[in-house]
Amino acid sequence: MPERVGWEGLPAGLREQVEERTGPVVEATAVGEERGEERGGSLAAVVRTARQGRLFLKGVRDDDVERAAALGYEQSLNRAVAGVGPAVRHVVRGDGWLVLAFIHVDGRHADFRPGTGDLAAVHSVVKRMARLKAPRGVAVPALVERYSGRLAPGDAELLAGETLLHTDMAPHNVLIGRAGGHAYVVDWARAATGPAWVDPAHAAVRLMAAGQPVDDALGWLATVPAWQRADPAAVRAFVRAAAADDGPAEDHYRHLLDG
């Protein structure tokens, strides 16, 4: 795991480039390891700036090739996820770093546990996600590429689709804004294309993993329009592949066949 740095640990020239765009940084708070939206970076900080208020900075060193590629991929998708993920205000490259400055969502991670009040907001965001498409000119892998070697003949065709999928609807990747209670999905570094019902299905599995009764999770999923249109044969193909990919959640995935 690369060593994490705070705002003050960045090269002076890089900090100057950021402040040229945002105005002086008057306060900086490091984001802890438990925060999902900073995964994949060596820098994760919320800064308060003189001109643009609070921003979330996510950055990685260029020589951390894999993570730098992931952050660059996330940047390339940002406009495509408008209205679902926080927008990137600035892209700063210099001194061996790539830094993205996102609009800061004042909120908390979603609660998927029994008794939560967040499921309506999560339902709303997965409905919006069903309209997302991969941007032109960006090489977005197909979901089926992730499941190579565990698909039966014909499964790849069943799981083909043009929707831009997040593919990891864990609660640490969903923020609930304090103002209005809207949900936002962060960390798009593993996005792929496939059927629109896949992300709601992943969310339902995460609900079960958080302790929601199976019937309640499936009842929530049944109200999502994209899931209502899912081809049962495609769902079976997805369960076969995803259950093998996510061993601890295998039983939860198989419960999707009951829905």
Image (cartoon, rainbow, N blue to C red):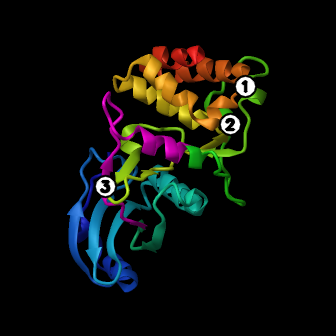
Whichever of callouts 1 and 2 sits on the residue coming sooner in the sequence is 2
**Above or below: residue 144 compared with residue 45:** above
> What amino acid type should be assigned to the residue bearing mark 1?
Asp
Q: Earlier in the sequence, mark 3 or mark 1?
A: 3
- Seen at 57% across and 44% down, the residue is 127
Q: Secondary structure at mark 3?
A: strand
Residue 139, image x, y percentages:
68, 52
Mark 1 and mark 2 in contact? Answer it, CB < 8 Å. yes
Residue 14 left/right relative to 68: left
Amino acid under disc 3: Gly
Which residue, given by chain and number where applicable, does mark 2 sit on?
A: 195
Query: Does the stretch in magenta take in 120?
Result: yes
The residue lying at 31 percent from left, 55 percent from top is 107
Q: For label 2, count other residues whose C-alpha is less than 10 Å away and answer few (under 14), some (14-19) or many (20+).
A: many
**Is 66 positioned to the left or the right of 162 in the image?**
left
| Residue 231, numbered circle | 1
Indicate which disc, 2 or 3, sits on the residue closer to the N terminus. Answer: 3
Stretch in magenta? 101-126
Image coordinates for residue 106, horizontal then vertical, percent = 31, 60
The verdict on residue 70 being magenta is no
- Residue type beneath disc 2: Pro
Foreground label between 1 and 2: 1
Query: Where does the image place residue 40, in percent across and percent down from the top left?
Result: 40, 50
Cα separation, mark 3 vs mark 1, equals 36 Å
* Residue 164 tag number: none
Residue that mark 3 sits on: 107
For the residue labelled by badge 1, is the local secondary structure a helix, a strand or a loop? loop
